Amino acid sequence: MEGHRPHVLLVEDDRDTREMYSEYLSYSGLTVTEAATGRRALEKVKAQLPDVVVTDIAMPEMDGLELSRRLRADPPTRDVPIIAVSGQATERAREAGADVVLHKPCEPDMLLNVIEGVLKTSR
């Protein structure tokens, strides 16, 4: 990916999980921006459009379903791939706009493989 480090917005309310994914993805060559809530993620998306959004579903303030719906409804983010990571709500996540739904617990290497696959097909 010649000089361009793909930008991932990682939305996860559990700090340990967020830090684990963030460190692994950064080490693997991706630029990672973190957000602990869906509301904070929307602010960060406006500041810098990511190449892909990885979001938990169950979060306080605004869950990943509402975040996905809002991203899909906004023209600048309509086509940004969304990967939902959830213990449940698989079908609801797809209906809200997620391109891929991964089940928790999800190993970081599996998440990286899915991100790389989504980035290849979205270009």
Image (spheres, rainbow, N blue to C red):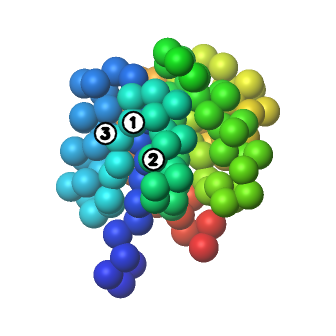
> Where is 116 relative to 106, above or below?
below
Q: Quadrant of the N terminus?
A: bottom left
Q: Neighbour class for label 3 at 10 Å: few (<14), some, many (≥20)?
A: many
Q: Which residue is mark 3?
A: 21
Mark 2 vs 3, N-terminal side: 3
Q: Which residue is mark 1?
A: 35
Q: Residue at x 67, y 28 (%)?
A: 66
Amino acid type at image mark 2: Lys
Q: Residue at x 53, y 52 (%)?
A: 46
Q: 36 or 21: which is nearer to us?
A: 36
Q: Neighbour class for label 1 at 10 Å: few (<14), some, many (≥20)?
A: many
What is the C-alpha distance between the residues marked 1 and 3?
12 Å
Image position, residue 104 (x, y; %): 46, 24
What is the C-alpha distance between the residues marked 1 and 2?
8 Å
Element under disc 2: helix
Element under disc 3: helix
Residue 113 visible, this orientation: no
Residue 44's label in the rendered image is 2
Amino acid type at image mark 3: Tyr
Amino acid type at image mark 1: Ala
